[in-house]
Amino acid sequence: MVDFDYARPRTLAEALALLAANPEARALAGGQTLIPTLKQRLARPALLVDLQAIAELRGIEVGDGFVSVGAMTRHAETASHAGLSAAIPALAFLAGGIAHPQVRHVGTMGGSISNNDPAADYPGALLGLGAQVQTTSRSIAADDFFTGLFSTALEPGELVVRVRFPRPVRAGYCKIANPASGYVTTGCFIADFGGGRVRVAVNGAGPCVFRLPALEAALGADFSPAALAGFRQDPKGLNADLHASAAYRAQLVAVAVRRALSMALSASPLLESSPA
């Protein structure tokens, strides 16, 4: 690694002041991406601002119609939280399937979504559930937060504070993972909010997580496997690498959609309606 200064602030205000005072500073969340990047000398921050001691960025709140997760809440906490698991089982299931136990006990939701790796799990949940991302300066809808490959709407010095998820009637998530790395090759998150309101998000297949509006309309009219009849994903614009071609990923999208819907249908409806 190259030399850099290190700070471990106790409050969010202190962290923001450190980042504002040094344009070459970088915030450190769980470090699951940034630390390997530093080891490979692909990043050269002058100062690393470690967010792990900031209590106000941690914790899970479950309320009527919503679940709120602090940015520094670790994946393992999200996966094992009883209230969250009861409110949005598919979200807990997703968190429990991220990487391996060591990563789940260090990695954080805020770090993951701020990095916006196309092979990450959480972008699928945020977009599929229509979450709101609370930052240090504003609230951003998930539809506007993820802007492209490793790109988000965050401005320099702006940090994710919490993510607020509306509670669906039922939801399902399927990840088809790379067997070697565990990263998402293709995934799908489906959420049914009742009243014909359905959201479908696909992660891993393209440079950035995306929705399937036509399928959302079909499932909104008939939330059953019959709505998937004739569904085909266009491979144009999908990722193609040594792990999977764009055409193969397009086929995987159909598989992930079908499995996510099956999971949603197998779950007992949690709420008769949702304010989302």
Image: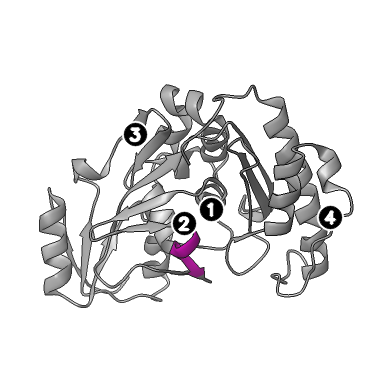
The quadrant holding residue 38 is bottom left
What is the basis of the colouring in this image? Answer: one colour
Mark drawn on residue 210: none
Q: Which residue is mark 1?
A: 127
Q: Residues within 10 Å of mark 2 (few under 14, many from 20)?
A: many
Q: Is residue 128 left or right of residue 7?
A: right
Give the amino acid at mark 1: Leu
Q: Earlier in the sequence, mark 4 or mark 3?
A: 3
Q: Earlier in the sequence, mark 4 or mark 1?
A: 1
Q: Is residue 131 above or below residue 185?
A: above
Real-space CA distance between mark 4 and mark 3, rounded to the nearest whole angstrom: 37 Å
Q: Earlier in the sequence, mark 3 or mark 1?
A: 3
Give the amino acid at mark 3: Ile
Q: Secondary structure at mark 2?
A: helix
Q: Earlier in the sequence, mark 2 or mark 3?
A: 3
Mark 1–mark 2 contact, CB under 8 Å?
Answer: yes
Q: Earlier in the sequence, mark 2 or mark 4?
A: 2
Mark 4–mark 1 contact, CB under 8 Å?
Answer: no
Q: Is residue 23 left or right of residue 170?
A: left
Q: Position of residue 251 (x, y in %)?
A: 83, 58
Give the amino acid at mark 4: Phe
Q: Secondary structure at mark 4?
A: loop
- The range drawn in magenta is 142-147
